[in-house]
Amino acid sequence: MTATTRSYLYVPGNAADKLSKAVGRGADALIVDLEDAVPLQGKDAARDAVVAWLAEQPAGGPVDLWVRVNSGPLRETDVQALANIASLTGIVLAKVEDGAEVVAIDALLTSLGDSTTSVMPLLETAAAVLDARAIAAGPRVQQLQIGEVDLAGELGLLPGDDEAELAPFRALVVLASTAAGIDPPVGPVSRITKDTDAFEVSTRRVQRQGFVGRACIHPAQLPVVHAVFTPTADDVAEAEAVIAMVAAAEARGTGVVLDEDGRLVDPAVLHSARRTLALAESAAGRDGTP
């Protein structure tokens, strides 16, 4: 599978003014939040408001619509309310601990007659990261997301500007996703909302580490994320050249392919080229460019 969604913008589920404007903010996808953004006493009202809002949205609209549900006892109630909503792309499962939780959510949705809603587990604890492979292999899982703020707090990490302390956990999530054959994981949120240059450095690092797209907590982050994850014209030309070279070699019956600089073009390079073209095509469609 190849992910083509560049940005996921978190929107509080209890903020009617923000929710009403969210689709027009420019994100490829929204994650409407019923968890951290909503105080305990407002959970029921927020859930009802989000369900009503989703009912007003068209199925298959230009923006993918996800909802982050609560963990613990409220999770089942949230999922039951969201089942079978045509406009909903999927459910983000906050604070997943193991693969069994994903199996349980699949069983719940299936029992409610919902066969289409996808799942995006959010890995925020040591237990979740250590069970990432089982979580990634769970039913309905489209891709993973890593919650680094909670994870760093649990582990007692103090990440520096280069985020080196987080690299091992990011690698595990990327590895688990690839092993499960699901979409590459969504890049973690960043608390940097004003320093555009610093946020771009962080986002390019996330891209190099194997993530495709990034979750955002503020609309100001969207242009940077789109710039980083939208292939340039040169990127597209290079990807097209790789695919053409492989096709020509196959037609000649040649197994070894070298590019014009003498570098080996192997299946991994071909896979990257196809991902680049898929991202470029999706970005053009979402941005309305030819």
Image: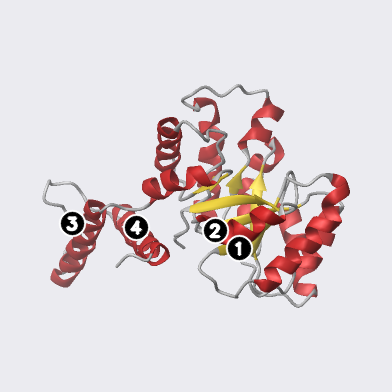
Image location of residue 88, percent across then percent down: 65, 68
The image's mark for residue 65 is 1
Q: Front-most of 21 and 70?
A: 21
- Sequence-wise, the earlier of marks 4 and 3 is 3
In the rendered image, which residue does mark 3 sit on? 257
Asked if residue 107 can be seen in this view, the reply is no
Earlier along the polypeptide chain: callout 3 or callout 2?
Answer: 2
Q: Report the residue at 13% width, 69% height from top.
A: 252
Q: x, y percentage for residue 153?
A: 69, 28
Alpha carbons under labels 4 and 3: distance apart: 14 Å
Q: Secondary structure at mark 4?
A: helix
Q: Indicate which disc, 4 or 2, sits on the residue closer to the N terminus.
A: 2
The answer to the question of whether label 1 and label 2 lie on touching residues, with beta carbons closer than 8 A, is yes
Residue that badge 4 annotates:
271
Where residue 237 sits: x, y (%)?
Answer: 21, 57
Identity, as a three-letter code, of the amino acid under mark 2 = Ala
* Badge 1 element: strand
Q: Secondary structure at mark 3?
A: loop
Residue 55 coordinates in the image, percent (x, y): 70, 72
- Residue 277 vertical placement versus 252 (above, below): above
- Contact (CB < 8 A) between labels 3 and 2? no
What crowding class fits label 3: few (fewer than 14 Cα within 10 Å), some (14-19), or many (20 or more)? some
